Image (cartoon, grey):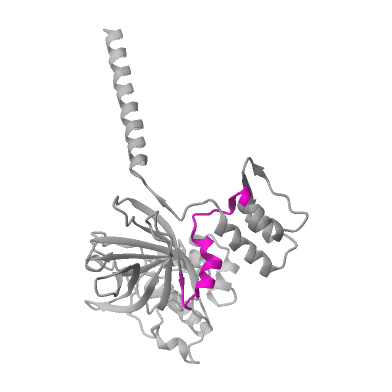
Amino acid sequence: MLDNNFSSSSHTFTDYQYRVLNRIQRELTQQKISQKKLGEACGLSQPSISKLLNGSSPLTLEFLYKVCDILNITMDSLLSTKDTLPDKMSVMDPNIQDIMHTNQNSFNDAIVSDPSLYPFKGILGTYQFYCNPTISSESKMLNGTLSFKPFTKNGKAYCHCELTLYTGKYDVNGEKEKKVYIGTMLISLPMQSCYCMLSCDESAEYVFLLFHHMFLIKSDLECRMVAVLTTSAGSHRRPTMEKAIISRAKLSQSDLKEIEGQLKMNCSNIKITKNDFEEHILKELPEDFTIPAYKEIYFIEESLIRSSSLSSEKQLELINKLRKYSIEKRYTKISTHADDILYNFITNKNRKMVASQKDSSNAQS
């Protein structure tokens, strides 16, 4: 669970903001840096920096990031929810090599790993997890759970991640087969992103999850679209990119049917066949709606639907339906053919270059 300090009336968001401001003021005093110098370093005028430091103007992520860089302090320390801190918030490089199985042990201080800090507020807990299978012959959506919990190792706090994914198959005992991936989550404040790196020891497999981060004040994160980087489950193991849905609430089959199109590799310009368009979409559109078409494919820009005369509820329903019937794939795979094409292109280019250099050398001699 998150730091219980946030649940008490004496620790409102305003209190928290002033606690952060007091830490900045303390560091300025200890390092003998004036507000004017801080403002110049941040590219802000004296009135602007004064309003930020006295709480008149809301703190921005960009400002906090610059302050940490100028004062040489960690974002973790500055944004801590704890009442007491060391006299000096010196830069520390948390080593999570043994957790993430990586040899990278130096992190920018704008990357937050301690789940007791404010950026994690509203994110911890358990979510339902939904994604498409990466085998082309299978179409039934996979499901599981994704949990984020505080974890301490060697005196350091981390956000422990656990993804349990049911494969849609059953073992010899009739039990659902599942894969369990374990890892940790980091939050990059400048990138406004949550990064999860997980591994499954049983299959010697890694999975990377990435989703957008936002600061939550009074509510919990309800759901997110997640980018997934994994390896295909078929006989040909290939790098694969797909989307997933995480939701605190369990989604019914009818819910999943309605939003399954969000898992396709769509962009905002949705492509749909003429037959599917006429069967599922045409009757839903306003009479004055213009659709660009190329042969048997229609191109529909989402923004046009959002700005149409349809009600917001109808717009959402129509966009979900468009994505569902779009011609885009459920995932993108780097196939063997893609590697072969790249290899042949580069080797042919190199051979031509060598031959050209040889001809040039012979001509000069």
Q: Position of residue 95 (x, y in %)?
A: 25, 67
Q: Position of residue 193 (x, y in %)?
A: 44, 64
Image quadrant in which the C terminus is located: top left
Q: Please tell me which residue lies in front, 96 or 42.
A: 96
Residue visible at 59% across and 68% down in the picture: 48
**Residue 18 as seen in the image, left or right of residue 363:** right
Residue visible at 69% across and 55% down in the picture: 282
| Total numbered labels | 0
Q: Is residue 109 above or below residue 160?
A: above
Asked where in the image residue 24 lies, by quadrant, the reply is bottom left
Q: Position of residue 320 (x, y in %)?
A: 59, 63
Q: Is residue 197 visible?
A: yes
Image quadrant in which the N terminus is located: bottom left
**Residue 83 as seen in the image, left or right of residue 311:** left
Q: Which stretch appears magenta?
A: 246-275
Q: Is residue 250 magenta?
A: yes
Give the residue furthest to the bottom.
9
**Residue 117 as seen in the image, left or right of residue 288:** left
Q: Is residue 247 above or below residue 42?
A: below
Q: Is residue 167 magenta?
A: no
Q: Is residue 181 visible?
A: no
**Residue 240 as seen in the image, left or right of residue 51:** left
Q: Please tell me which residue lies in front, 206 or 124.
A: 206
Residue visible at 53% across and 72% down in the picture: 255
Q: Position of residue 361 (x, y in %)?
A: 28, 13
Asked where in the image residue 297 lies, by quadrant, the reply is top right
Q: Please tell me which residue lies in front, 101 or 76.
A: 101
